[in-house]
Amino acid sequence: MADKTGRKGKKKKGSAPAAGAAGAGTGARGAARSAAAPPVQKNEYIEMTIDGLTHEGNGVGRHEGFAVFVPRALPGEKVKVKIIKVLKNYAVGRLVDVMETASHRTEPSCPIYKRCGGCSLQHLDYEEQLRQKRQWVVDNLERIGGIQVPVHPTIGMENPWRYRNKAQVPIGVGGEKGGLITGFFAPRSHEIIPMDSCSIQHESNDRVVEAVREIAGSLGLTAYDEKKHEGLLRNVVAKVGFRSGEVMVVLVTREESIPEPARTRLIEGIRERIPAVKSIVQNINPKRTNVIFGDRSVVLWGEKYIYDYIGDVKFAISARSFFQVNPVQTEVLYGKALEYADLSGTETVIDAYCGIGTISLFLAKRARRVYGVEVVDEAIADAKRNARLNGIDNVEFAVGEAEKVIPWWYAQGIRADVVVVDPPRKGCDRTLLDTIVKMKPERVVYVSCNPATLARDLRVLEDGGFKTVEVQPVDMFPHTGHVESVSQIVLNEEAGSR
Ligand code: SAH
């Protein structure tokens, strides 16, 4: 989910855009080897019909049987394309003209949509985005897993805008008179494109970024220059609790000292302009790196944590801690996971890849005992803190790899009635799946951010005696290609007789 889905999967050089992953079926076939020379050449103009869409927002069509990927073209459209890249198995074209427009095409509301690339599906109307996301799940399950099960219509958002509770924005030099700018990195570069507002961010985050930029700029504070490794302000990170309304401002700086009186005035200025601010934190990152956070944080003013809720569970959020970025849909997704877990209060549950324990704590109130496992120790520290915060004492959290810890638990005689998995994009480790097959829980609930690895893993579980009952896609990231779903899997009866 959330940040776990993001930017982890590096694309192999020369592999077709999104072929295989959540991409359109046509994409994968397009990557098949063809012995003949490609029928298109660089800089050539062609007309073609688009018949597929990858989750990166690339339309896919065929020119004399050869796959051509065209960013921002939509299925059903007849388009004119300039070929800009030709590889062995596919080409990439730039959209020159849409000659026949798809009925689902819509005008992106964001003025910098084309340059940002963050919302790859903004040109597709929201209803169709939801339909498309369900279709990607169906296609992957069938093609990769050979699995045909009911896949429900994607649960979307009533208002699919302003849904993010966290913004991480680089600060740079630019604008008139060399003042401060905030924005995003242009694709494949470190040039900062200025941005005043992001329509998938909570308004509060936009206001925080603007306040920091203007106040720090007027105080003459410098922006970090990554080429020279000079200057002070690297990033501003804004967080807001949707339900609590509490705001946190994190200033990531290259060095610890912020000169006075600018430091005091900066804090005063932020408090004045953002009355809901509860916490102003400085994080120090002295390294030459693209990683946003450094190891050390100091509270400049207010509290160390802000708080927010998912369902009726309260979570403490610190400068660096992970928290689901779309809390509204997280509640929907994990609510579905709870429904699929079908707990009566007597069960032992294992929550694999538990992060800060969101699902574990959600399930704990309806289970006898919950065991959570997660590889990042800071996340487990947060999970334990959140358990205490909510007075939940029937959960146990362990740091480690799910594929090592759960087999060890199994060897100790721990048997779960329900296993929940919420892995990153690469899916579950095979050893973990084999252990689940041996453990024979009555139900498995699989929360997935990548339908391709979901399909692969469901196949292993099905071959091991489980049956997938149904799949519910939930739209956690409207206007982007991310596809989240939750599946219910049950033990087949004959396999269940131990
Ligand atoms: N359900 C979690 C989020 C899961 S995101 C929550 O609500 O917080 C996937 C998580 O898997 C990440 O926290 C990541 O750190 C963790 N992870 C990745 N590989 C792992 C592994 N091999 N074993 C255990 N956890 C892992």
Image: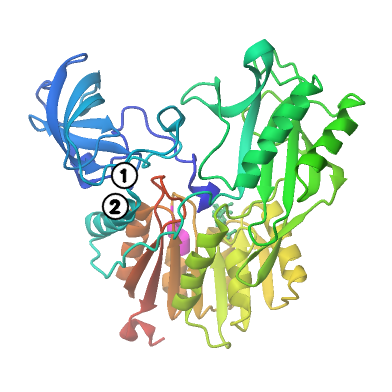
Give x and y (percent) for residue 357: 63, 64
Query: Residue beneath label 2, please?
Result: 128
Residue 245 on the magenta span: no
Quarter of the picture for ligand 1? bottom right
Disc 1 residue: CB within 8 Å of ligand 1? no
Answer with the quarter of the image where residue 438 lies.
bottom left
Callout 2 secondary element:
helix
Q: Are the residues at dot 2 and dot 1 in contact (C-beta closer than 8 Å)?
A: yes
Left or right relative to 283: residue 243: left
Magenta segment boundaries in residue numbering: 427-432
Residue pictured at 51% horizontal, 42% vertical:
199
Residue pictured at 69% horizontal, 59% vertical:
380
Q: Viewer-proximal residue, 163 or 255?
A: 163
Above or below: residue 486 compared with residue 342: above
Q: Viewer-proximal residue, 340 or 232?
A: 232
Residue pictured at 49% horizontal, 57% vertical:
423
In the rendered structure, which amino acid carries the disc numbered 2? Glu
Per the model, the C-alpha gap separating discs 2 and 1 is 7 Å
Give x and y (percent) for residue 131: 29, 56
Callout 1 secondary element:
loop
Query: Residue beneath label 1, please?
Result: 124
In the rendered structure, which amino acid carries the disc numbered 1? Leu
* Few, some or many residues within 10 Å of mark 2 (<14, 14–19, 20+): some
* Few, some or many residues within 10 Å of mark 1 (<14, 14–19, 20+): many
Residue 193 got which mark? none
